């Protein structure tokens, strides 16, 4: 009886279908756009560049959405906040 249970566990684990399950599929990690392009400099005065990092309501997008590393996400946040204060970006959009 115990042998049947062990065989069932082995069959479930070795059938190759675990990569197919879309619910538990591993997502590929996004590459930080600022790390990948060394010439790209984030500037708080460039509103068009910063619009990629805010959503349609004006909120700053999280790291999982932007794909930025922690270091560059902090610079994105700081640049967006500075741009809001000098009225390059709106605080909110209706």
Image: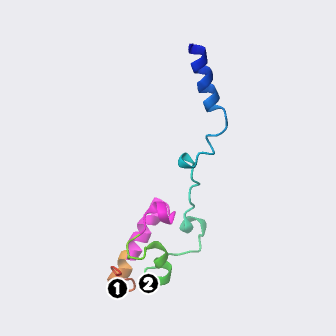
Residue position for label 1: 86
Residue 5, given in percent of the width and then of the height, sits at 57, 20
* Secondary structure category for the residue under label 2: loop
Q: Which residues are magenta?
A: 61-80
Residue at (46% x, 78% y) in the render: 51
Residue 35, given in percent of the width and then of the height, sits at 56, 65
Q: Quadrant of residue 71?
A: bottom left
Residue 58, given in percent of the width and then of the height, sits at 38, 76
In this rendered view, identify the residue nearer to me: 18 or 26: 18
- Which circle's residue, 1 or 2, is located before the other in the chain? 2
Residue at (40% x, 76% y) in the render: 80
The answer to whether the residue labelled 1 contacts the one labelled 2, judged by CB atoms less than 8 Å apart, is yes
Give the side of residue 18 with respect to residue 66, left or right: right
Give the side of residue 91 with respect to residue 76, left or right: left
Q: Quadrant of the N terminus?
A: top right
The residue most toward the top is 1
Q: Is residue 64 visible?
A: yes
Residue at (59% x, 74% y) in the render: 39
Asked if the magenta segment contains residue 72, the reply would be yes
Give the side of residue 16 with respect to residue 43, left or right: right
* Secondary structure category for the residue under label 1: loop
Q: How many marks?
A: 2
Asked if the magenta segment contains residue 45, the reply would be no
Tell me the tag on residue 45.
2
In this rendered view, identify the residue nearer to me: 8 or 39: 8
Residue at (43% x, 74% y) in the render: 54
Give the dominant element type of the magenta stretch: helix, strand or loop.
helix
Tell me the tag on residue 15.
none
Residue density around tag 2, few if under 14, some if 14–19, many if 20 or more, within 10 Å: some
In this rendered view, identify the residue nearer to me: 15 or 36: 15
Q: Is residue 46 visible?
A: no
Q: Quadrant of residue 15?
A: top right
């Amino acid at each position: 009886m115990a042998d049947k249970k062990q065989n069932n566990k082995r069959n479930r684990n070795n059938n190759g279908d675990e990569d197919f399950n879309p619910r538990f599929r591993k997502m590929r990690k996004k590459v930080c756009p600022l790390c990948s392009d060394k010439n790209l400099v984030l500037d708080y005065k460039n509103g068009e560049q910063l619009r990629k990092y805010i959503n349609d309501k004006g909120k700053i997008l999280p790291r999982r959405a932007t794909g930025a590393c922690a270091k560059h996400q902090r610079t994105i946040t700081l640049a967006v906040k500075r741009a809001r204060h000098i009225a390059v970006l709106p605080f909110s959009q209706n």
